[in-house]
Image (tube, helix red, strand yellow):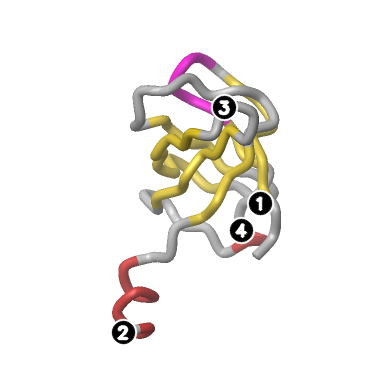
């Protein structure tokens, strides 16, 4: 899995990650935003996918920071086929 990170914060809830169609991301897919310095994670959801980046919205309560690591959650269909 490629290491992804937040490349731009728009406000306290909306941000861009450096991935998009190149990483087969889809709208409404969930992601985990990991903060290695403070060892917590936030849940977020992809709002829009572009060629080289994706617009995301934070769903968790913790603050997000520029450079936080992002882990893509498998889609529902992928989970069913893995079972």
| Image quarter of the C terminus | bottom left
Q: Residues within 10 Å of mark 2 (few under 14, many from 20)?
A: few
Q: Earlier in the sequence, mark 2 or mark 4?
A: 4
Q: What element carries label 2?
A: loop
Residue 59: x %, y % from top left: 34, 32
- Direction from residue 19 to residue 40 in the image, left or right: left
76, above or below 71, in the image: below
Do the numbered discs 1 and 2 sit on residues whose CB atoms are within 8 Å? no
The residue that mark 1 highlights is 51
The residue that mark 4 highlights is 21
Q: Measure how far apart labels 1 and 2 are at the Cα level.
A: 31 Å
Q: Which of marks 3 and 1 is nearer the N terminus?
A: 3
Residues in magenta, as a range: 11-15
Q: Residues within 10 Å of mark 4 (few under 14, many from 20)?
A: few
Q: Measure how far apart labels 3 and 1 are at the Cα level.
A: 31 Å
Q: Which mark is residue 83?
A: 2
Q: Quadrant of residue 22?
A: bottom right
Q: Earlier in the sequence, mark 1 or mark 4?
A: 4
Residue 26: x %, y % from top left: 46, 57
Q: Which of marks 1 and 2 is nearer the N terminus?
A: 1
Mark 3 vs mark 1: in front? 3
Do the numbered discs 1 and 4 sit on residues whose CB atoms are within 8 Å? yes
- Residue at 43% of width from left, 35% of height from top? 42
Mark 4 vs mark 3: in front? 3
Mark 2 vs mark 4: in front? 2
Which one is nearer the viewer's eye here, 5 or 8? Answer: 5
The residue that mark 3 highlights is 38
């Amino acid at each position: 899995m490629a290491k992804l990170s937040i490349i731009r914060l728009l406000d306290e809830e909306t941000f861009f990650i450096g991935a998009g169609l190149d990483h087969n991301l889809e709208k409404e897919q969930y992601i985990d935003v990991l903060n290695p310095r403070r060892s917590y994670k936030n849940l977020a959801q992809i709002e829009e996918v572009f060629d080289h980046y994706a617009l995301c919205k934070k769903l968790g309560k913790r603050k997000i920071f520029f450079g936080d690591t992002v882990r893509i959650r498998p889609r529902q269909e992928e989970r069913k086929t893995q079972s």
